[in-house]
Amino acid sequence: MDQWVLRWNFDKSVYQPGESGRIHFWLENTGSNHLHIEKTWLQFDWQGDQAYYSQVNRQVPPKNNYYLTSLQFDIPSKKAGMITYSVGLDFYEYISYTSQWQKLPQWWSGHKYFIKSIPMPYYRAFVSRGLKPEERIATNPIVEMIKEWGFGTRTVGIEVFSDPNLIDQATRDEIKRSDCFVAIATKRYLDALSGMWRTFEWLHGETGIAFGLDRPLLVIIEKGVVVEGLPGYLVSKGRYPSVEFDPLNTENFRGQLDAVMPSFRECIASKKSEEFWNAIARAVPLLILGGIFGYALGSSRR
């Protein structure tokens, strides 16, 4: 049985949607037989049965560590957040007692690794959402997906606390300091007359403040909820985008959010000043986590 260590590193610690990148591979042969590396593979979570590969055709003697190759890849323009991937090899092992090269089964890393795709610049989003425990359980995953698209989120009562007598002023101040407004309309009570679910009342007031301050708006509505008032009017007239979510099907919602977010960010960008861009450029490096290096152990089994 032969053994090896495949190592790799990406050319950046974090990427942006729509960007190209490059990964480099090394192989350490820790066994006693020669290995002939035919191809290296890189497969991201969105590729299905497809994968990137590079033709190598290089021998690695026992107890040696050789650079193999690099390959280029592309991040889809609507792919943000944590991106999982696997790496693989096509290769041969030299069997000394038969003096022949034996084709080994295609090898893939045993578990998933990840890199980050984070749009820049980093924006500040005021998120209007319910504070009850059951509402936060439903909205916490949504807020995390919003963060993956390059947003820091603020909600009065969650990230921001205020004197109960000054909540209205604190809310207005936070919306004013934010670059955009996201309303998440979750179920609050069942209307006995209509049989429809209504959301929390102050979502309408916070939407009114954001609309008055001309902030870009995005309305996210839980399946089964009827949104009336100003947010309902703005959505029905096509003035602002809306996305429906089902707490039991978050992956479907993720796809819808990914389709909306590039345009939403473009809308925000059109309102930004040069001073803000410079401030964000200084702040972003503190917010990024990346998986630039990686390695995996392997062995042949006979």
Image: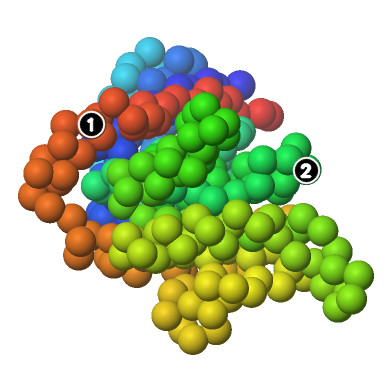
Residue at the extreme left of the image, as rendered: 274
Residue 173: quadrant of the picture: top left
Pick the quarter of the image with the C terminus: top right
- The amino acid type found where label 1 is placed reads Ala
Q: Position of residue 101 (x, y in %)?
A: 48, 38
Callout in the foreground (2, 1)? 2
Residue 300: quadrant of the picture: top right
- Secondary structure under badge 2? helix
Residue shown at 60% from the left, 54% from the top: 202
Q: Position of residue 123 (x, y in %)?
A: 31, 47
Residue shown at 24% from the left, 47% from the top: 121
- The amino acid type found where label 2 is placed reads Glu
Residue shown at 54% from the left, 80% from the top: 233
How far apart in space, not on screen, are marks 2 and 1 (Cα)?
33 Å
Direction from residue 139 to residue 98 in the image, left or right: left
Residue 231 visible in the snapshot: yes
